[in-house]
Amino acid sequence: MNSLIYQIGRLDRNIIKKQKFTIEGKTRSKQLSSFALKEHLKENGEQAKVILVYPVSLPFNRTLENANFGDFSRSLKAVLRNPKEEYLSNPKNFFSNMPYSSEVDDFIVIHSIGEYAGINFQGKFNDIVFEIALDMIERYNEEIERIYVDISSGLNIYVSALLEAVRFFSIWATLKNWLPEAKRPEIWITFSDPILDNEAAEYQLHREKLEFKAFFASPINKEDINNVAKKIYEDDRSKKRKLSSLLENFLVIFSAIKNNIPLAVYLFGYEDGEVIDETSRTLIEDMKKKLYDSYAASPNLDKNTYSKGLLSLAFYSGIAEVFWHYQIKNHDEDDGIDLDELKRIFDDLYSLFSLKPNNVFLGNEISNTKRIMGKINIEDSTWHLLIKFHNKEYEGRTPDKRNFFAHSGLEGLVTEMKKEKDKFFVRYTREYTDKSGNKKSVKNLIREWLKEEA
């Protein structure tokens, strides 16, 4: 099992002092509780890495100026005495030489909030959350099965950001993984007893599993399609167009599943998962460029906008993976879809997405449709408008949105059926006639209906 342990890094006068942390009856002397947890996990067959999160303001503590940290003291004094711009241009150099660096597998440097040594750090809480969450998302591909967040460093604003970041990551990972065999990393919180100035003391390290729920609900609505892409990529038309297109296609497919319109999934199809993931990676890189443009102040990214973008792409990628697994493809409009195949596949999908009531409604609709057609002598391989078998008086009528959603998308004026031996096939017709007598696209009509009801 591969695990990551996140903890807020410390820099105080006791940083080189080892504390005694006890886990399951065994005591280990380490500077940080995350180091003790890592050693415990490895001894029990679990591969673990410690990722420390350093607020950029950590060195700016005047009480440390005369502290004896050996060679590290020179690095610390250099930061305090040299122009601050030099340090802020690349703070990673400083943190790579921390006294306990040999225990650290990797680290990230985040923005700070407040004034330290005369420097006013203008970081924003939501930006700090994104900085940590994006790091977790990028490490997701390392086949991580557990993430531990160690809050033993104290209940300060950075620990709060760490907890909010892992909550966001957990929801992101859940939306991206729906198949039973897919890995959704477990989230654990760890913390030690309060650490006192007592060399003989031993501190128990506690672990609790956290559960963050994510439901089959869209992060975006119809209005968000253009708004989110525009706010994120205001000056980049190409990226804005691509993101907007993916968000629209996601919303259409999401709505088709949620509203029990399975035939629409075959009508519209979906993007390849790698295309979606590549767009997500680009978004993350663009966010990081904005976040780390300056360590003195963070850009104050719109949490709502960027969260919608990240979560929608993750959700779309997860849906695409499910569709690929069930071999759902954009069908040839001439061939149509076998009703029995439609029912079989979507029975599984609705169970997977926790939408079991849709199974009942779809089953009833398909049974009623087959029963009606089964009583009628239809020439084989001939397509017929479904409304012919429900109501002979349909001339001059237009497709009805309410009927469309009430009948699992099998609305009589837009759906065609044919019978081949004992099989029934359905498809959407290409055009309908509006009230003015004009021919209009059925595909465009259904797309708009689905976006409105997402």
Image (spheres, rainbow, N blue to C red):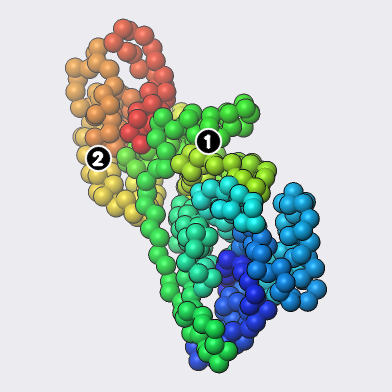
- Residue 68 in view in this figure: yes
Q: Give the label on residue 246, or none.
A: 1
Q: Distance of mark 2 from mark 1, alpha carbons?
A: 31 Å
Q: Amino acid at mark 1?
A: Leu
Give me the residue at 38% from left, 26% from top.
448
Find residue 241 and report its horizontal and vertical position in percent. 57, 28
How busy is the neighbourhood of tag 2: few (under 14 within 10 Å), some, or many (20 plus)?
Answer: some
Percent across and percent down for residue 226 are: 49, 28
> Please, what secondary structure does the residue beneath circle 1 have?
helix
Q: Quadrant of residue 214?
A: bottom left
Q: Position of residue 134 (x, y in %)?
A: 58, 53
Q: Earlier in the sequence, mark 2 or mark 1?
A: 1
Q: Is residue 320 visible?
A: no
Percent position of residue 286, x then y: 64, 41
In the image, what residue occupies the spot 59% across and 41% down?
Answer: 299
Figure label count: 2
Residue at mark 2: 365
Res 444 → quadrant? top left
Residue at image position (37%, 49%) is 216
Element carrying mark 2: helix
Left or right of 55: which side holds 125? Answer: left
Classify the position of the C terminus by image quarter: top left
Q: Residue at x 19, y 23 (%)?
A: 391
Residue occupying the far top of the picture:
436
Given residues 264 and 94, the one toward you in this image is 94
